[in-house]
Image (cartoon, rainbow, N blue to C red):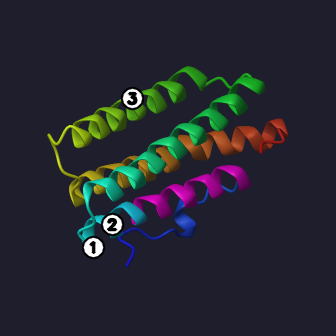
Amino acid sequence: MPIFFWNDNLKVKNRFIDSDHRHLVELLNVVYDAMNQGKGPDVLDSVLEDLVQYTQAHFKREEDAMQRMQYEGYAAHKEEHDKLTAKVLEMQKRFLAGEVKLTVDLLQFLFDWLFDHIIKIDTQLAQAIKEAKLDVK
């Protein structure tokens, strides 16, 4: 059973960004399901790695689009991406070292960050992409 649900409030009305965000929400739910089912660290490690890799790929696609259109807010937007990436990689490292366990609180933090980022930052980016008539895939 998913803990997070994709809904219209999360849409920025850009096909590639919305598709990526929807997939990120799905990955968060996969991590949650694995935790709920008591799956071992090896399974959680694999699922968490998928989440990390997909997040990094999504950020790169957004950053490439911003650079192509010389987006005014690029530096601040990239800084947000870099902060989250560093935090997630640190959490993953600590999880693999057995220092921390994945918890609902961690997933809630990730979902809250994603929701906040979508509403406050990616909505502006999607509008800029639309105005620039940039074809982003």
Query: Considering depth in this image, is 35 or 59 the residue closer to the camera?
Result: 35
Q: For mark 1, give the secondary structure.
A: loop
**In the image, 75: left or right of 106?**
right
The disc at residue 37 is 1
> Is residue 40 positioned above or below 45 on the image?
below
Look at 26% across and 61% down and name the residue there: 40
Q: Residues within 10 Å of mark 3 (few under 14, many from 20)?
A: few
Q: Residue 98 location, x and y as percent?
A: 17, 42
Q: Residues within 10 Å of mark 2 (few under 14, many from 20)?
A: some
Query: The N terminus lies in which quarter of the figure?
Result: bottom left
**In the image, 111: left or right of 79?**
left
Is residue 17 one of those drawn in magenta? yes
- Which segment is the magenta one? 15-29
The disc at residue 83 is 3
Q: Quadrant of residue 108?
A: bottom left
- The amino acid on which the numbered mark 1 sits, given as a three-letter code, is Gln
- The amino acid on which the numbered mark 2 sits, given as a three-letter code, is Ala
Q: For mark 3, give the secondary structure.
A: helix
The disc at residue 34 is 2
- The amino acid on which the numbered mark 3 sits, given as a three-letter code, is Lys
Q: Are marks 2 and 1 in contact (CB under 8 Å)?
A: yes
Query: Considering depth in this image, is 126 or 26 the residue closer to the camera?
Result: 26
Q: Quadrant of residue 60?
A: top right
Mark sitting earlier along the chain (2/3): 2
